Amino acid sequence: MTWRKLIPSLFDLHRDDRMPKQFAIIASDRIAMSDVALHQRLLGGVKQFARKGNFKSADWKDFSNHITYQQGDFEDPATYSALATRCEQTGKNWRGKAIHIFHMATPPTLFGVIPEMLAGAGLNRDLALARIVVEKPIGHDLQSARELNRTLTKSFHESQIFRIDHYLGKETVQNILAFRFANPLFEPIWNRHYIERVTLTVAETVGVGHRGVYYERAGALRDMVQNHLLQLLCLVAMEPMASFAANELRDKKLDVLHAIRRISPNAVHQYAIRGQYAKGVVAGKKVCGYRQEEKVSPRSKMETFAALNLFVDKWRWEGVPFYLITGKCLPKQVSEIAIQFRDVPHQLFPREATSDWHPSRLVMTIQPEEAMVLGFQAKYPGPKMKLRPVEMHFNYRESFSAPSPNAYETLLWDVMNNDPTLFMRADQVEAAWRLLMPVLEVWANNPARDFPNYAAGNWGPKAAVKFSGRVKWKGKSIK
Ligand code: BG6
């Protein structure tokens, strides 16, 4: 996390002149390491993961001068008193009081320990200046999430806690708000009268790689749906905010989570589908099955694919199915939200004109393309009335010359600026877990008998393709 995300993002912020005038990064771990060795290691991550282009050694030298290492055991109070002393010494000659941000880029087992230890050393005390950043997983289920939130709030006030869901930092995800609420065009039709269904897909070509230990306890539902996909759904389904205040946005999202119909245990098989990849071919390369991955049980029943059909019980959305689909080792990496509009109420064109007819559709592509595509009918040139589907494109790359920052740049900058808008509040996290508990419990109590049930490089188990009712658009599906 530090190597791949945090340091490259901070380096990019520094390169863009967006870091504070005075700052220090103190990395801590239990192994012995010199500052020079740490810099050497971090440089590898920066070269690989910082925004591409114009890397200059001078920039790195300047930036890395701010990074020091402190060896210490996370469970030993001495580590924290040493840290407190170092923080004090570092900020001694700075103008003004320093902000202290503690980013727990650690295994989740330490999430319960570190906040209390920081509090023990008095590092939590300043409500305005001390902040703690928590990475997912925020709990393993509702109960553990509640416990973790209790532990965190014993030592830090909710306003000091920044729970990261990195999807919320993505430009295209923030653009959902801009698109919906900065243009009066779509809001009048953003409801059950005009929208037939919404499909949110986060498809990955990668398998679990070296994360077998984590994934064996998580699975697709915990890893992707509880956080990223449900957050996307909230942004699509929420009511307009009164202002851009952090809690206003978070309240509106929470309303959606509360309005989502709970799946009763005996209906789980109807509204949720799971899958696990077998060996196969992805992007022309042979890959092993999930059960053959490093540190994964050869009899594992963990899902690597999940699809849910949810309903948001509100006037605006009554009866509109929301499909949430995610999986590893699928044929294509794509994250997108597809809004399928209803068909025209009355077909007035002659049959010959409509042989290639597709109801309108809006696809917001989050990655790898950062785009929006609106598909609609147009008249095909010629003397006869003949209709054809066409597409209108908006693409970030073509429309803006500025490169999109990666999600962590945005989020870390927000923590420094004390803006919690894009972070998860305790009640949101718990509401998302509450919603998924029936599915998690039914799946845990009824291990899948047909796993593995899709070959790597396919679009998940057969049942899922039918389940989401994907329509084809111009001969291509959203795949
Ligand atoms: C993480 C999950 O939260 O998101 C990973 O733990 C997943 O399993 C990743 O691969 C996907 O993020 P992105 O930004 O690459 O879509």
Image (spheres, rainbow, N blue to C red):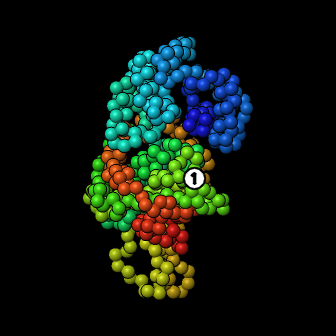
**Which of the 4 quarters of the picture holds residue 428?**
top left
Taking the image as drawn, is residue 246 in sight? yes
Q: Is 214 displayed left or right of 194 in the figure?
A: right
Could you tell me residue 210's position as x and y percent?
A: 58, 44
Image-based side of 57 in relation to 323, left or right? right
Determine which quarter of the picture holds residue 199. bottom left
Q: Is residue 294 above or below residue 198?
A: above
Residue displayed at 60% across by 25% down: 31
Residue 419 x/y as whole percent: 43, 34
Q: Amino acid at mark 1?
A: Gln
Please state which of residues 215 and 183 is positioned toward the viewer in this rendering.
215
The residue located at (32%, 46%) in the rendering is 434
The residue sitting at 47% across, 67% down in the picture is: 462
Helix, strand or loop at mark 1:
helix
CB of mark 1 near ligand 1 (< 8 Å) = no
Q: Position of residue 409 (x, y in %)?
A: 55, 38
Query: From this viewpoint, which residue is outermost toward the right?
Result: 57
**Count of numbered labels shown in the rendering:** 1
Residue 156 position (above or below residue 272): above
Residue 238 in sight in this render: no
Density class for disc 1 (Cα within 10 Å; few <14, some 14-19, many ≥20) is some
State which quarter of the image contains the N terminus: top right
Front-lying residue, 241 or 466: 466
Q: Is residue 394 left or right of residue 47?
A: left
Q: Where is residue 475, by image quadrant?
A: bottom right
Q: Position of residue 2 (x, y in %)?
A: 57, 34
Give the residue at mark 1. Answer: 292
Spot the residue most to the front.
299
Q: Tell me: residue 352, above or below residue 247.
A: below
Q: Residue at x 29, y 56 (%)?
A: 265
